[in-house]
Amino acid sequence: MNGSSSQQAETKPQVAKKAPKFNLDNAIYPSAEEHKKPEIAKVSSDAARAANTDIVLYDSDGKKKSQATLLIEIGQQAALFHDENQDAYAEVKIDGISILYKIRSRDYREYLGHRLYKLIEKGANATAITDAVNTLEAAAKHDGELKTVAIRVFHDNDSHTVYIDQGCSKRKIVKIDRNGLETVTEAHVKFIRKNGMTELSQASDSGDIGLIRKYINVCEEELPLVYGWLFCALAGVKPYPILILQGEQGTGKSTTSRVIRLLVDPSSVLLRNPPRDSRDLMVSAANTHCVVLDNLSGLSPELADCMCRLSTGGGIDVRALYTDSEQFLIDLQRPILCNGIDDIATRPDLADRSFIINLPVISNKERKSELEFWQSFEKDRPKIQAALYRAISSGLKFRDQIKLTEKPRMADVVQWVTACERGLNMEGAFINAHTKNQMLAVELGIDSSPIGSAVMALMSDRKKWIGKPTEFMAALEDIAGERQVRSKAWPQSPKGLNNAIKRLMPNFRKMGIEIIKYDFGNREYRIENLNK
């Protein structure tokens, strides 16, 4: 009895605990009783805008959702999709403007973290962001639509339309078709912004392509080659020709390169150093529309081959990060502009894809101060941009009407540029300049090769030469001389000679030298000078 009384005395009445209140921009979380039935959290206007729509902070059991869950819900409010390479993207709306993020990117992780902080006033932990990114990426790949993603330029062959990302903060797109151009904010193609991209000049109502003469140090007869490269690069017409600017110190190679790039793909870093290897070049190309390499001192065979792949299409295959067997593929085509003092396109396959321009020396009287030069250029830039857009519209309108009597290498480029020229009343200028330029490139390719020079000397005064590989090699060695034969550029075996001849075969053919090697019966070379 006493024990019972003592126990009752010690028992204290239970007081209901109040649910803790959490202040969020002067808004209160629902109490424990209130959140038995989940309600949408009332958040500040900033938080609402950050999350695009209200987020439910508690699940159906009244438990507070984890950061990963909230991040996933924030991410799901965007349009999730993937491209043909199975890269995942999220398109979000901020203040009515569509912004595209690659889901597996630092920018998108920062976006999610910022939105979560606006919602709960706490930073997102790394594990939650990683979990959310993995989930959203899977949703974009497996549940999202397949869409076209481009950098700066997309050429839609089906609708005969070119879309160009203006690069401005309002995400405006220049849409060009056969009838002209207009500025839009939405298109079926989605443009991704890469670090360093800046804004293209707003085109004026009237254009004048000739104004570019004031800002690039190129001879009049070679100007159509620069125009042609611009028409292809700005319109996304593939395969892309390679523009090579060569000249001694003081010829304005770097300045000319900057001007050209500003008209196609302006960037906070207009010129870049030569890459160390082909992988660096391909990765750089994956993050920009226009590849510009400054001050090249020749090209290694590896980089020359890589530039050819970028011109006509190709890629690299590397091991995916943190895996042993998965592949990471990059398949790219990009317009390339490079400059240097040395002869760059000495290999025939690179020369065939290139416009090689030798810049003249600028006299002291013709030089301008940097301030004067760029102020004048910015004044004329809108008119030059307008002329380029008009040329692209002309190309879309007349391309199917252009019939080439002979189709050279990269015939699509010749057809396109000729169609663009028609709208500027300069049709035919490009094909004439291109033909002369290609012959100069052929001669350069042969002259830069010790084997090429020796073969031309061997056939200079005869119509035919027939002999076995060893005899052919001995004849060339006699012409080249001991010093040349001992150099690293000289082949050390008949097999090496055969490889060198194969590489130069297209150039020999254009120079009227036909070389046939028979590998059966009496193995021999038969060389004929068709000019005799």
Image: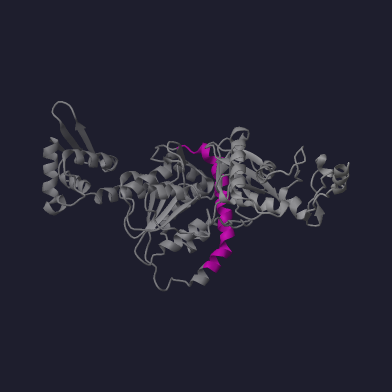
Q: Which residue is at a point 39% across and 53% down the rendered structure image?
A: 275
Figure quadrant of residue 513? top left
Q: Position of residue 327 (x, y in %)?
A: 45, 37
- What number of labels is visible? 0
Task: Provide the major secondary structure of the magenta segment.
Answer: helix
In terms of depth relative to the viewer, which is nearer, 519 or 491?
491
In terms of depth relative to the viewer, which is nearer, 137 or 88?
137
Above or below for 512 versus 116: above
Give yes or no for residue 91 being in the magenta stretch.
Answer: no
Figure quadrant of residue 39? top right
Q: Position of residue 210 (x, y in %)?
A: 51, 58
Above or below for 408 versus 224: above
Q: Position of residue 269 (x, y in %)?
A: 50, 60
User: Is residue 335 something one can see in this rendering?
Assistant: no
Figure coloring: one colour
Q: Quadrant of the N terminus?
A: top right
Magenta residues (range): 374-403
Q: Position of residue 85 (x, y in %)?
A: 52, 37
User: Is residue 333 something one can see in this rendering?
Assistant: yes
Farthest top residue?
521
Q: Quadrant of the C terminus?
A: top left
Farthest front residue?
2
In terms of depth relative to the viewer, which is nearer, 386 or 26?
26
In terms of depth relative to the viewer, which is nearer, 235 or 332?
332
Tell me: 472 left or right of 338. Answer: left
Tell me: 5 left or right of 155. Answer: right
Give yes or no for residue 396 being in the magenta stretch.
Answer: yes
Q: Which residue is at a point 51% across and 49% down the rendered structure image?
A: 289
